[in-house]
Image (tube, rainbow, N blue to C red):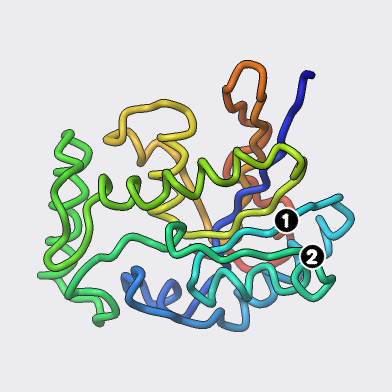
Amino acid sequence: MHSIKDIYLIRHGETDYNRMGVVQGSGIDADLNALGQQQAQAFFEHYQDLPLDKIYTSALKRTHQSVKGFIEKGLPWEQHAGLNEISWGIREGRTPNNDDDQYYRTLVRTWREGQVDVPSEEGESPIDVLEKQKPVVELILSRPEERNILIAMHGRAMRVLLTHLFEKPLHDMDTFGHQNLCLYHLQYDYQTQKFNVIKANHTAHLQGLPDCM
C-alpha cells in the first residue's frame, strides 16, 4: 500500500537566551520568554485543526512549551533526549564575549570544512548528535500508523537531522535555515523511503509578531 507520513517539524519558540544571543545547548533548560509563548500560541492557532496522531519533543522544556496547546488537547506525546540540542560544552549560557564568539565561529567553520567529528570543548560534535537522533528517527518511521506527527526540537539539532533525512553530507547542515518557531513540513513516502519538503523554514503563522532569532 502506498503510504505517506506527514511530519511537521518545528524549532522551539524564543527564549531570553535567544534574545540576548547566548548559546544554549542541551545543558541549558530555558523557558520560553513572552515572545516565545506568543509564537507557540500563534502556531497552535494556525495548525490546531491538523489531524495529529502524536507529538514528539526533546527532553528540554522549551520544546514542551512550544507545543503546549497541542499537549493540552490530550494528544499522545513522547519526549526523547535523542532530539535534544547539541551540547556546546563549557561555554553554554555565558554572556556573549569576543573570545567565545570567535571560538564558535571557528568551530562552525571547522564543521563546514568537513570535520564534523570535532566536538565543542567538553561538548558534542555533529556526529555525536546524529548518532543520538538515528534511533529516534527509526522509531518514528517504524510507526506508519502515525500518519501526521509534530516534532519540536532545536536549531542546530534540526540542521543535523535534516541532512540525515535528505541524505546530504553533514557538513552541509548550515544550508538548512531556521528561526524560532519556524516550520519544516516534510513528507515521508514508505514506498520510496524518501523524504520530500513541502515547506521549509516557514513562518507565515508568525505574521504580526516581532521578528525573532
Q: Which corner quadrant of the image does residue 186 belong to?
A: top right
Residue 182: percent from the left, percent from the top? Answer: 60, 53
**Left or right: residue 165 compared with residue 94:** right
Q: Is residue 116 above or below residue 209?
A: above
91 up-or-down from 149: above or below: below
Quadrant housing residue 148: top right
Q: Residue, x 20% and y 69% (percent of image)?
A: 89
The N terminus, quarter of image = top right
Q: Is residue 127 left or right of residue 84?
A: left
Q: First in sequence: mark 2 or mark 1?
A: 1
Asked whether the beta carbons under mark 2 and mark 1 sit within 8 Å of each other, the answer is yes
Q: Nearer the viewer, residue 96 or 110?
A: 110
Q: Residue placed farthest to the right in the image?
A: 49
Q: Amino acid at mark 2?
A: Leu
Q: Which mark is residue 54?
A: 1
Please, what is the three-letter code of the amino acid marked with disc 1? Lys
